[in-house]
Amino acid sequence: MRKSETIKTIGLIISIIIIFCLSIYIFILKLFANVDNDYKKLGLKIEYYSIEYITTYGYDEFCTYKVYKIKNYYSSSMKELKSQLENSNLWSKNKFYEYIMKEFYEIKEDEEIEIDREDLYYYDKNGIYAIFDIKNAKLYYFKNGLFNYHKDYNEILGVDTSNYITREIYSVRGGPQNDGLDYYVYELTEENRKEIQETLSKSQIWSKNRLENDILDSFEHNEEVLSIENGYYHYELVCRTSDENKKYNFTEEEATGYEVGVYDIDKNILYYYWTSI
């Protein structure tokens, strides 16, 4: 009887030890699972021990914005990272447009401060925008599920946009009627320049007649649109409605918004703006 009780006691102790060890193991797994590793998505060889600190400005299911301070105790560390940035197909020196740049900031004394614009490298892929500041050894990471959400827009107003050098998209839509704003800028490849110009020259909705400045002012982040000397233009009121017939047959009073297209012939750049409220 005593032997049986001893075995039960030993079994109970072993069970408690196993449960305790499992609890510690699960805790450690959760701890490491929560370790920040968003910087690893950007194609740079940055290890956790290379990061001095992380500042999180916004982090929820819709928006993630963080700033990583990279250890810069030795000049060689930045030289190595700069070499990675210059040889990467994911990073470039092509700066973001201002409507994207304004999402990057630092906070000092409860005030948003514009980041230093010198010696920056830019990353834009899969809805993630990032900036690497070589001068100050900082990595800025921004992702917003609403900011750059869009379907595959292969054609806009009859212009094939599938071949492009660079593309900037600001698209915010929502609600049952999908209201909001689309703001696109495509720098198109040389190979489709001729085809695009032929398409626009035959189009019924594009014209070489320049639009009024109050319409072109819609491109508030691209003031160069106002000085285009050789271009095609498109402007049309839109009506947000579930009635398919009314989408194409409505009065000016019934319009819920408008769209503007501008194609710069000399630079082979397409600007497109759509809004509905």
Image (cartoon, helix red, strand yellow):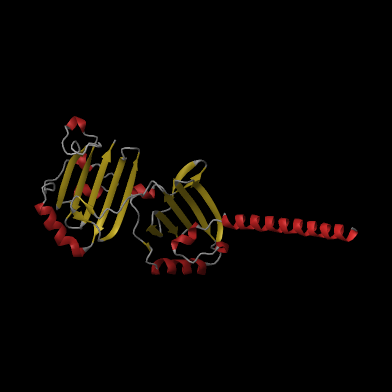
- Asked where in the image residue 219 lies, by quadrant, the reply is top left
| Extreme residue toward the right, this view | 2
In the figure, 216 relative to 138: above or below? above
Report whether 27 appears left or right of 136: right
- Choose between 82 and 61: the one closer to the eye: 61
Q: What count of labels does the image hold?
A: 0
Task: Give the residue at x 13% y 55%.
Answer: 199
Q: Is residue 4 left or right of residue 23?
A: right
Q: Nearer the viewer, residue 206 or 101?
A: 206
Q: Position of residue 211 (x, y in %)?
A: 16, 43
Q: Is residue 137 visible?
A: no
From the viewer's perspective, is residue 7 above or below residue 104?
Answer: below
Q: Which image quadrant: the C terminus?
A: top left
Residue occupying the far front of the picture: 1
In the picture provided, is 10 more to the left or to the right than 264?
Answer: right
Q: Quadrant of residue 217?
A: top left
x and y percentages locating residue 76 in the rendered image: 51, 69
Whether residue 88 sits left or right of residue 184 in the image: it is: right
Q: Position of residue 149 (x, y in %)?
A: 36, 49
Residue found 83% across the figure and 57% down from its top: 9
Q: Position of residue 15 (x, y in %)?
A: 75, 57
Q: Which part of the image, by quadrant, shows the N terminus? A: bottom right
Query: Residue drawn 51% across and 44% down?
Result: 108
Residue 268 in view here = yes
Identify the residue shown where x is 46% and y is 54%: 140
Q: Residue furthest top?
A: 253
Looking at this view, name the residue that lies furthest to the left: 202
